Image (spheres, helix red, strand yellow):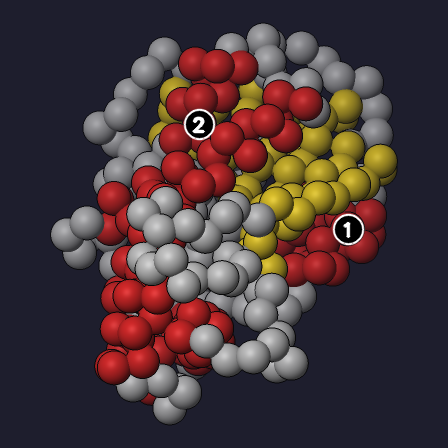
Amino acid sequence: MTAAPGGGAAGGGARDGGRYGEAVFRPEESGEDERIDLGALAYDDITMARLRALGAGPGWHCLDVGAGTGTVSRRLLDEAGVANVLAVDRDVRFLTGRTAPGFEVLEADITVPGFAPGRFRLVHARFVLMHLPEHARLVTALADLVAPGGVLVLSDAVDLTSDREPGTPYTEAMRAMWQGLRATIGTDVSWVPSYPRLLSAAGLTRVAAEIQVPPLVPGSPISRFWADTWERSRAAMLATGLVDDEAVDAAVRYLDSDECAALSAGMLTVWGWKPGDAVR
């Protein structure tokens, strides 16, 4: 996916059978593509800087998993000049109308055993695995799609609120959101810091990681993204009993005020290389 905590869904299912794009963040809802693009405005520059630093460029064949509206896929083609990008999503309605040379679209569920669209110099997934069960299996499955000499790059959210932090309208809303999403669609960010270990266990080498946190300032893309995300996940948040409608509304107002002093959820990005010599 290309936006947190949602974007295009590449598969998934909560323990109770719900999944991203059905119970919450339905792609047919008006404005869902705009919400995803707000997340892209907040995170795409960070993602592209990392992919370029890893060498993504001419001759690279790339897989973008949970591609959402395709912003990263298109920037890989337009800015990095890669050879081609296969953009995969369980629902491709936001991808099919945005064709470009070297841009291919595949509608698929990556959680289905046997998903094997080929081997790629770059396999990238952002804000995807946090919504899916069987984390270790899926990391291994994605690592298997990396060609020798290629790189797997995974990004997901890390929750920077804590029980020891004084309560604010923002922290109350974030805690309710994470708990509500976990109950409805299985979103779980608690395991995300284990990414480096999982990539290493999948046989990748030179594993490294970084965390980036976009600033929460009034009117910024990330602030607008969270406000829209809370609105779309409001029912799940209310069901936790941690917030009511008034509390969610207060959190939205807080985001857009000069009183806001909080950390957004961070984005942890981890990468690892497949042993062997790259073949162009």
Within-10-Å neighbours for mark 1: few <14, some 14–19, many 20+: many
The amino acid type of the residue labelled 1 equals Pro
Q: Nearer the viewer, residue 46 or 30?
A: 46
Residue 52 vs residue 210: left or right? left
Q: Residue at x 30, y 34 (%)?
A: 95
Q: Is residue 52 above or below residue 219?
A: above
Q: Which quadrant holds residue 73?
A: top left
Count of numbered marks: 2
Identify the residue at image location x=35%, y=66%.
254
Instruction: Kindly tell me whether residue 159 is visible in this rendering.
Output: yes
Q: Position of residue 223 (x, y in %)?
A: 37, 53
The CA distance from mark 2 to mark 1 is 24 Å
Instruction: Describe residue 109's horizontal placement relative to residue 100 as left or right.
Output: right
The mark nearer the N terminus, 2 or 1, is: 2
Q: Position of residue 58 (x, y in %)?
A: 58, 8
Residue closer to the observer: 226 or 192: 226
Q: Nearer the viewer, residue 164 or 26?
A: 164
Q: Is residue 5 left or right of residue 232?
A: right
Dot 1 falls on a residue whose secondary structure is helix
* Amino acid type indicated by mark 2: Ser
Where residue 171 appears, as percent x and y from the top left, is 48, 73
- Residue 112 visible to the viewer: no
Q: Quadrant of the C terminus?
A: top right
Identify the mark at residue 216; answer none if there is no mark.
none
- Residue drawn at (63%, 30%), measured in percent from left and top? 50
Residue found 72% across the figure and 54% down from its top? 195
Residue designated by label 2: 73
Name the image quarter holding residue 136: bottom right
Dot 2 falls on a residue whose secondary structure is: helix
Q: Is residue 211 left or right of residue 2?
A: right
For label 1, the residue is 196
